[in-house]
Amino acid sequence: MEGPSPVSALIHAATMVTAGVFLLVRCSTLFELAPSVLEYVAIIGAATAIMAATSGLLQNDLKKVIAYSTCSQLGFMVFACGVSQYSLSLFHLVNHAFFKALLFLGAGAVIHAVSNEQDTRKFGGLSRLLPYTYVMFLIGSLALMGFPFLTGFYSKDVILEVTAAGQTLTSMYAYNLGVITAFFTSFYSLRLLKLTFYGISRSPRAYLLHTHELVEDMAYPLAVLALGSIFFGYFARDLFIGFGNSY
């Protein structure tokens, strides 16, 4: 997390997530021939999801919270592969790219605005000074939580539903940890919003004097990602879940 925010956004939204999960999806034929390995994949995926989520609860660095969130969502994608739902895993991977890139670039916007400070304990009340950044961050956070009818909801909710429908010991283990992880995700996302944008300001006066909203060149990419975070899941659900589904 020491790198520039655009680099973090690329790594966490595209490169790091894509590599492992995409390989699992591409090798699905091999995994289907080894059911015991699939169970192992589901167990590791669910454990990863909750481990990273609990780590995210306790972070104070703005970008580290979002980074642990990436690892947690990776767990969702992996245990979806473990219960043979490869298309849903890929769906969540694509959806996740939109709102995670939005969150990282939003975090970069906040850090840029407050003199390169990353400690959320030194923020507070920034919604009044950075209204555009706040709205973008809110959209990304709600999509990450799986708020109804935003992009994250369409993949995250279906993954939990089909995992519960498996009715095996492994799938119920993954489902229960997935539900707890979803709760933790909402908790640390709301905590991040509260510490950064709500309440009274805890920033040094020198930071506040130089706080400024994004320039146009930085604002446009956030708007494009916000549109994807709101609408992509809705428009792509048939493609990934199956045509004619009632979801």
Image (spheres, helix red, strand yellow):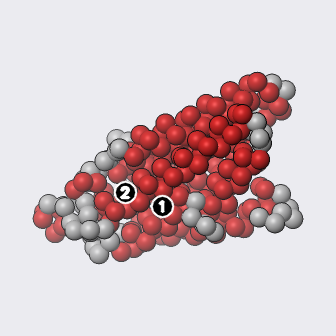
Quadrant in which the N terminus is drawn: top left
Q: Could you tell me which residue is drawn at 83 percent across and 63 percent down?
A: 245
Q: Residue at x 51, y 64 (%)?
A: 142
Please state if 144 lies on the left or on the right of 3 as rendered: right
Eyeballing the image, is 32 above or below 89?
above
The residue at 28%/73% (across/down) is: 129
**Distance of label 2 from label 1 (alpha carbons):** 9 Å
**Residue nearest the viewer, comparing 105 with 215:** 105
Label 2 secondary element: helix
Task: Work out whether 139 lies above or below 25.
Answer: below
Task: Say which amino acid is labelled 2.
Answer: Leu
Residue type, mark 1 in image: Ser
Q: Is residue 26 visible?
A: no
Image coordinates for residue 109, horizontal then vertical, percent? 36, 61
Q: Would residue 67 be found to the left or right of residue 127 on screen?
A: right
Q: Are marks 2 and 1 in contact (CB under 8 Å)?
A: yes
| Residue 180 rendering spot, x and y as whole percentages | 54, 47
For the point 58% across and 59% down, which residue is it? 146
Mark drawn on residue 192 = 2
**What element does badge 1 sit on?**
helix
Q: Quadrant of residue 131?
A: bottom left
Q: Pointer 1: what residue? A: 141
Residue 89, image x and y in percent? 69, 46
* Quadrant of residue 40 within the rendered picture: top right
The residue at the far right in this view is: 244
Q: 174 above or below 223? A: above
Q: Position of residue 128 (x, y in %)?
A: 29, 75
Q: Which of the marked residues, 2 or 1, is nearer the chain's N terminus?
A: 1
Residue projecting furthest to the left: 205
